[in-house]
Image: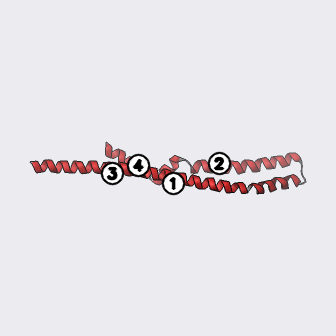
């Protein structure tokens, strides 16, 4: 009878150990995911700093439009739509790329979280 209790205790302990290992692995995985996301953000910051160099190209564009022989109203409307597009498109893309929900879903962390949660119940 003693061997039966030891077997049950051993199996229960392994089950608890596996569940705890999954939980800790998930925590490490989520920290790594956050670190990856932050490194991408750092890369984007460097990229955006390099984009400041492109400001000279924008200045050249504005100068070219002003030198263009057309009505002032048409020039201003053209510049407005160009600058609105150059702001809106990257802003939308950055919002989508930096979404934590998107990173969570694409990385597969949702499946791991479901595994851990189902093991607890």
Of badges 2 and 4, nearer the viewer stands: 4
Q: Residues within 10 Å of mark 4 (few under 14, many from 20)?
A: few
Give how far across and how far down residue 2 sits, in percent. Answer: 10, 48
Q: How is the image coloured?
A: secondary structure
Report how far apart the C-alphas of labels 2 and 1 lie in the structure: 20 Å
Which of pointers 2 and 1 lies earlier in the amino acid sequence? 1
Query: Is 26 displayed left or right of 86 in the figure?
Result: left
Which of pointers 1 and 4 lies earlier in the amino acid sequence? 4
In contact (CB < 8 Å): disc 2 and disc 4: no
Give how far across and how far down residue 112 sits, in percent. Answer: 39, 50
- Residue under the point 75% across and 54% down: 55
- Disc number for residue 91: 2
Report how far apart the C-alphas of labels 3 and 4 lie in the structure: 10 Å
- What SS does tag 3 mark? helix
- What SS does tag 1 mark? helix
- What SS does tag 2 mark? helix
Which of pointers 3 and 4 lies earlier in the amino acid sequence? 3
- Residue under the point 76% across and 48% down: 81
Report how far apart the C-alphas of labels 1 and 3 lie in the structure: 22 Å
Which of pointers 3 and 2 lies earlier in the amino acid sequence? 3
Q: Name the residue nearer the viewer: 91 or 52.
A: 52
Residue at label 1? 36
In contact (CB < 8 Å): disc 2 and disc 1: no
Residue at label 3? 21
Q: Residues within 10 Å of mark 3 (few under 14, many from 20)?
A: few
Which of pointers 2 and 4 lies earlier in the amino acid sequence? 4
Report how far apart the C-alphas of labels 1 and 4 lie in the structure: 14 Å
Residue at label 4? 27
Report how far apart the C-alphas of labels 2 and 4 lie in the structure: 31 Å
């Amino acid at each position: 009878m003693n061997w039966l209790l030891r077997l049950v205790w051993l199996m229960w302990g392994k089950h608890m150990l596996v569940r705890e290992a999954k939980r800790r692995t998930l925590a490490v995985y989520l920290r790594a995911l956050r670190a990856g996301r932050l490194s991408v953000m750092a890369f984007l910051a460097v990229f955006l700093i390099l984009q400041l160099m492109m400001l000279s190209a924008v200045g050249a564009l504005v100068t070219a439009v002003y030198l263009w022989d057309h009505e002032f109203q048409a020039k201003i409307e053209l510049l407005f739509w160009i600058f609105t597009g150059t702001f809106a498109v990257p802003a939308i893309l950055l919002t989508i790329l930096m979404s934590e929900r998107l990173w969570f879903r694409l990385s597969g962390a949702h499946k791991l979280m479901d595994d851990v949660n189902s093991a607890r119940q």
